[in-house]
Image (tube, rainbow, N blue to C red):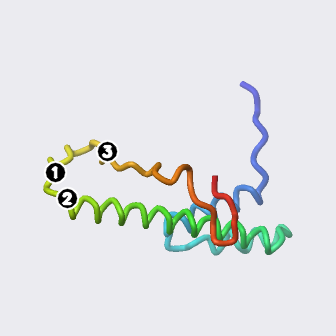
Amino acid sequence: MTDQPQLHASIVAMVSLASGIASNHPDMGQCQLDRLRHAGVPQHQIDAVIEIARHIRDEAAQKLDAAFDEASAAPAKPKVEKGKPLDVDVTESGCCTPTASGQSCC
């Protein structure tokens, strides 16, 4: 078995920060902000990570809301069996839309 190099601590902190924001984690990545700043990551890069994560979170919520609105306006559909995924198409707009400043999240 070969040893794989570990991700750099700043990359781990960025991924953790972004996933915490995108998932609405209660801590929202506060300790990752401190780690990134302590590691010397430029503020504009931290801001870009935050913007992308918030955009993904908000876009997911909008798509979920739209799917719910569509389902609630339509005639009753058969119930989804427990443990089966709900058939919702989230690919209408492609991979994703860019953030307000033009950052790509794909």
Measured as percent of width and height from the top left, residue 74 is found at 19, 59
Give the residue type at disc 2: Ala
Q: Which residue is mark 3?
A: 85
Instruction: Determine which residue is flagged by label 1.
Output: 77
Q: SS of the residue at dot 3?
A: loop
Disc 1 marks a residue whose amino acid type is: Lys
Identify residue for label 2: 74
Write down the quadrant of residue 27 in the picture. Answer: bottom right
Image coords of residue 59 (percent x, y): 50, 64
The total of numbered circles placed on residues is 3
| Real-space CA distance between mark 3 and mark 2, rounded to the nearest whole angstrom | 19 Å
Of the residues shown, which amino acid type is indicated by label 3? Pro
Q: What is the C-alpha distance between the residues marked 2 and 1?
A: 8 Å
> Do the CB atoms of the residues marked 2 and 1 lie less than 8 Å apart?
yes
**What residue is drawn where x is 75% and y is 48%?**
7
C-alpha gap between disc 3 and disc 1? 14 Å
Quadrant assignment, res 73: bottom left
The local secondary structure at tag 2 comes to loop
Which residue corresponds to the image point at 50% horizontal and 54% vertical from the top-left?
A: 93
The mark lying in front, picked from 2 and 1, is 2
Q: Is residue 27 above or below residue 83?
A: below
Left or right of residue 82: residue 40: right
